[in-house]
Amino acid sequence: MRKLILIIAVAFVYSSCNKEPNLKDTDLESGTFFDQSIYQPEKYLVSVARPNPTALEAQIPVVIAIHGYGATTFEWDEFRAWSGTRTDFSISQVLLGGHGRDYQTFKNSSWKDWRQPIINEFEALEKQGYKNISFAGSSTGSTLILEMLANGYFNGHIKPRHVFLIDPIIVPSDKLLTLVGVLGPIIGYTTVDNTKDEEKYYYHYRPYETLQELRNVINVVRKDLENGFKLPAGCSLNVFKSEKDAVADPVSAVMIYKGLTTNTGGHVDVSMVPSNLHVYTRLAGRDISPSASDVQNQTLVFNKIANLLISK
């Protein structure tokens, strides 16, 4: 009862407020600047950097790395930096549709719009002749990959070799997301307390329309997992989930373990990580310096991803 009263009170306060945020030039969503992958796609996308691979290059693993809701390609920058000058695999950092741009573009985007650049990059690589393609997703990026796997998208395409999910969100930790359909039109948008560095790469303002889209895709994938589905033949999947996560409830990992199997009916690999960070592979820009444990967790998963990518 107290929670309901609080929700009503919050709704009343916001109902008298402006439904559009007062954007500053320093905000990512101000439209003053966009994600760097828009300006220099050749530095982020293998399909643009190497559109005509040799027969040998076409066999080198490519991992399509996908960030989460309200974020940008920055979320996978540390993996690219960690990989350094390695040539035994390549990284394509995809910017989700509607993201990394102005507020209105974000507001008007659907979860299917978010997914489209993932499809675009995969199909471009496939058309160019790349044979060894994998996916790595963080948070909602993971949810979108799962949706593609569940809906049979890969039936008409080459099959991904590996899928890596970092803190996938199937069950949100903030249960108020379920009320966005009721409160959203009243409040217009919510805000996130980003650090000064994060403000350059993460939206500060979250339009309720995008929160509805987030809830929608989560619901789609949760239902798919409840019904159960299999990975494509020859595809492996690894989940890396923080034990304490203010965004994605750890039960998300349990649902994936129970609802998704390998093509032969085996269990997928799930690792619970001793961390309280959401997307624990991204340490830069946070309000506290990463601990030795944080760095170790990040290094371990980067090594695991790289080793699986280059395994025969």
Image: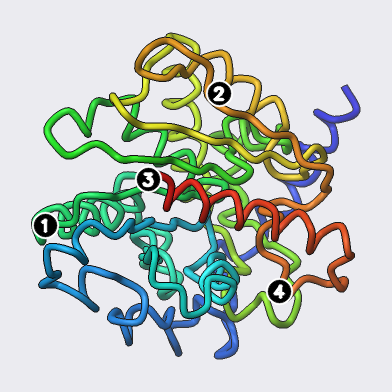
Disc 2, disc 4: CB below 8 Å? no
Per the model, the C-alpha gap separating discs 2 and 1 is: 31 Å
Task: Indicate left or right for 18 with 289 as reference.
Answer: left
Task: Indicate left or right for 165 with 223 as reference.
Answer: right
- Measured from the top left, where is residue 69 in percent x and y? 52, 54
* Sequence order check, earlier mark of 1 and 3: 3
Disc 3, disc 4: CB below 8 Å? no
* Sequence order check, earlier mark of 1 and 4: 1
Residue at the spot 29% in from the left edge and 60% down from the top edge: 60
- Report the front residue among 205 and 113: 113
* Residue assigned mark 3: 111
Per the model, the C-alpha gap separating discs 3 and 4 is: 26 Å
Q: What element does badge 4 sit on? A: loop
* Residue assigned mark 2: 256
**Residue 144 quadrant:** top left
Q: Residues within 10 Å of mark 2 (few under 14, many from 20)?
A: many
Disc 1, disc 4: CB below 8 Å? no
Disc 3, disc 2: CB below 8 Å? no
Per the model, the C-alpha gap separating discs 2 and 4 is: 28 Å
Residue 284's tag is: 4
Per the model, the C-alpha gap separating discs 1 and 4 is: 35 Å
* Sequence order check, earlier mark of 2 and 4: 2
- Measured from the top left, where is residue 163 in percent x and y? 44, 40
Residue at the spot 42% in from the left edge and 33% down from the top edge: 146
* Camera-nearest label, 2 or 1: 1
Amino acid at circle 4 = Ala
- Report the front residue among 251 and 240: 240
Per the model, the C-alpha gap separating discs 1 and 3 is: 28 Å
